[in-house]
Image (cartoon, rainbow, N blue to C red):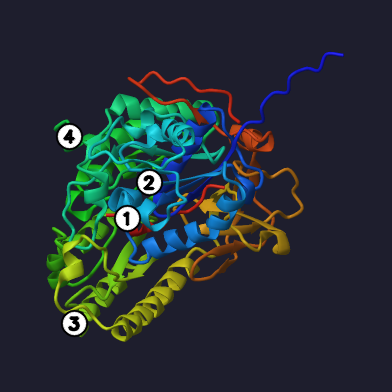
Amino acid sequence: MTIAPQTPQARTYDVRTYGCQMNVHDSERIAGLLEDAGYVRAADSDAADVVVFNTCAVRENADNRLYGNLGHLRPSKLAKPDMQIAVGGCLAQKDRGDIVKRAPWVDVVFGTHNIGSLPALLERARHNAAAEVEILESLEVFPSTLPTRRESSYAGWVSISVGCNNTCTFCIVPALRGKEKDRRPGDVLAEVRALVAEGVLEVTLLGQNVNSYGVEFGDRLAFGKLLRACGEVEGLERVRFTSPHPKDFTDDVIAAMAETPNVCHSLHMPLQSGSDQVLKAMRRSYRAEKYLGIIEKVRAAMPDAAITTDIIVGFPGETEADFAQTLEVVRAARFASAFTFQYSKRPGTPAAIMDEQLPKQVVQERYERLIATLEDITWAENKRQVGRTVEVLVAVGEGRKDERTGRLSGRARDGRLVHFATGGLTGIRPGDVVHTEITYAAPHHLNADGAPVAHRRTRAGDAFETGRTPRTPGVVLGLPTVGVPAPLPSGDAACGR
């Protein structure tokens, strides 16, 4: 009797992501690379043959979090010697070989500039039975040329640049991501069209400093032009971007937002502090008056615009008067929401060695006052939405209580989170679009408890229903091809500039 040879079982992988939207998108590329190399996503993440940590170095406790998680994996590694552990991202770029010294059971360490090397490094480490550490000082290839396994059938990240030319004293990102590198507009638009061809309705343009786009090829108006060009992509219903820098925010971008129908009237623009003195110490090249002037222009052009921000409390040397100025700007700006952070030292940044580091209890007390002020404002702004009919792109994972309440959730065009009742309608899927009337407002979300006014089935909803997500094999020279497709996680906005 002849016994047919068994096909070797494919090795499985799990990618664990920390940090900003750039890291989330990089993890989609890591997944795409591994699947191109023959790996399959693990059904049980705890049993994966390869675990990849895509790390962040922005927060002070980032290293503690990584090494704690690596420690939890050590028993699994001892029990299953063929298992491989890889560490990439910003913390890997910073700590380099120290990772293997502190966690000798790690097999591969790779940096922000050589994501594409991961499959080869895993194979080399397996062959040599030794750890492989490869950190490059500059970009090997633009990340968008790499294959990508998209996580969402209806919304996609599109990088327009990587790196940053700013020198903010609290931020280590430029040292880890390098100087700004811009993609050509044709390459960006090719990727956008490839996603839309697969049913994607919404794209978010990503850059460490997204509105300085064009600096590398000498066109300071390039970002506004790109927004307008996205408006000409048939089938693209929503365009967002993150994060702009106030120093580069120009009137032509405001005009492009207001005049391009599919560009959402939502703007995430980091403030960081409302004190001119603190902004100077942060090396932020704008002042509170300029910041508020931009908001005034945005609201004049788009009265319905929802503006969100990042704020750091307790920067070295911040006085009570400085903090009071931040509260004044917050009250004047009327933010729809904010990512708030207590200042923490980033090793390797100028701020980490500044005098006048503030006591924890002072920072905590100011932080609590900021949160209370913001919640009063965001709640009042959300109450203004009650009675309005909004368009919601139905999403996955946005409503933690949806199963219990019987609601579905998604984002309005202005970015606000909406939990809505189905009113007995069946067949509403993630990726579909509903119109519904807001009946209740909370500080961080809106409810719509009546039946939807309208429900539109979409190709994105079709894709979700059949379990498909776009898979882009890399966009090169503006000529993409899209393979047969195989909950968009939210990132920490602290990398926003």
Q: Secondary structure at mark 4?
A: loop
Which image quarter is the C terminus in?
bottom left
Relative to 450, residue 255 above or below: above
The residue sitting at 26% across, 68% down in the picture is 345
Relative depth, front residue between 254 and 222: 222
Instruction: Give the labeled residue for mark 2.
Output: 22
Instruction: Give the labeled residue for mark 4.
Output: 216
The image position of residue 159, as x and y in percent, is 35, 38
Q: Which mark is residue 115?
A: none
The residue sitting at 27% across, 50% down in the picture is 244
Tell me if label 2 and label 1 are in contact, CB under 8 Å. Answer: yes
The image position of residue 128, as x and y in percent, is 44, 34
Which image quarter is the N terminus in?
top right
User: In terms of sequence position, does the residue under pointer 4 or pointer 2 come before the other?
Assistant: 2
How far is the residue under mark 1 from the one under mark 4? 21 Å
> Few, some or many C-alpha atoms within 10 Å of disc 3 (few <14, some 14-19, many ≥20)?
some
Q: Secondary structure at mark 3?
A: loop
- Mark 4: amino acid: Glu
User: In terms of sequence position, does the residue under pointer 2 or pointer 1 come before the other?
Assistant: 2
- Mark 3: amino acid: Thr
The residue sitting at 58% across, 24% down in the picture is 484
User: In terms of sequence position, does the residue under pointer 3 or pointer 2 come before the other?
Assistant: 2
Instruction: Give the labeled residue for mark 1.
Output: 495
- Mark 2: amino acid: Met
> Few, some or many C-alpha atoms within 10 Å of disc 4 (few <14, some 14-19, many ≥20)?
some
How far is the residue under mark 3 from the one under mark 4? 38 Å
Instruction: Give the labeled residue for mark 3.
Output: 319
